[in-house]
Image (cartoon, rainbow, N blue to C red):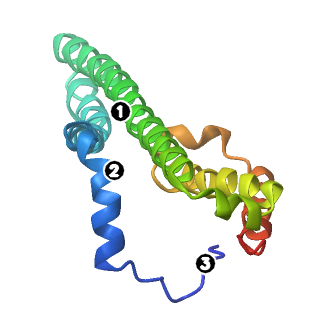
Amino acid sequence: MSHQSDTTPRIGPETRRRVWTFARPYRTLIIGFLGVVTASSVLGVVPPLLFREIIDGAIANEDRGQLTVLGLLVVGAALAQAVLSFFERWASATVGEGLIFDLRVALFDHVQRLPVSFFTRTRTGALVSRLNNDVIGAQLFEEVELAPRGCRDDFDPERLAELDGRGAHAAGGGV
């Protein structure tokens, strides 16, 4: 059951361009990640087909040689799936954490260039809260929306609600 509304917010071309500038250094990894996800999905179809052949072919014909070969292929498919899963998680984590790091650095650089008058007008606690929660929002998007299907084992809805509440509070802070 989805808690999202029926209308998906539109992302404007300016926002897409800004996001792409942050993602550009990771494009090779992103393309590799998509390739690994595709290969993993295709490989996921292989074991059921092999089991069908084991049951309908090798066992029905009492062919132990074919049964051995098909059994080794099932084991090979499982090992290949594990290797692809490792690279899938590594690429996802590398891109995600790299993007978050780049966002933090860009945000820090921006804050460093602000005039002193901005800091005299703005409450320090509200500013720090807003800075942290904006990056946490990006982190949540990366963790929940972009994480590969095998990486969601540690998903905690209570933590998401807690962080979402902090982000909503900070957004109302008027910074």
Q: Residue at x 28, y 57 (%)?
A: 20
What type is the residue that disc 1 sits on?
A: Ala
In this rendering, is residue 130 above or below 25? Answer: below
Residue 22's disc is 2
Tags 1 and 3 in contact by the CB under 8 Å rule? no
Secondary structure of residue under mark 3: loop
What type is the residue that disc 2 sits on?
A: Phe
Q: Residue at x 28, y 24 (%)?
A: 77
| Residue 27 found in image quarter | top left
Measuring from the top left, give residue 26's x and y in whole percent.
27, 40
Indicate which disc, 1 or 3, sits on the residue closer to the N terminus.
3
Q: Nearer the viewer, mark 2 or mark 3?
A: 2
User: Badge 1: how crowded within 10 Å, few (<14), some, or many (20+)?
Assistant: many
| Residue 160 in view here | no
Tags 2 and 1 in contact by the CB under 8 Å rule? no
Measuring from the top left, give residue 54's x and y in whole percent.
27, 28
How far, Cα to Cα, is label 1 from label 3?
28 Å
Q: Which residue is mark 3?
A: 4
Secondary structure of residue under mark 1: helix
In this rendering, is residue 32 above or below 21? Answer: above
Measuring from the top left, give residue 69's x and y in whole percent.
19, 14
Q: Is residue 155 left or right of residue 113?
A: right
| Residue 76 found in image quarter | top left
Closest to the observer: 45 or 129? 129
Residue 91's disc is 1
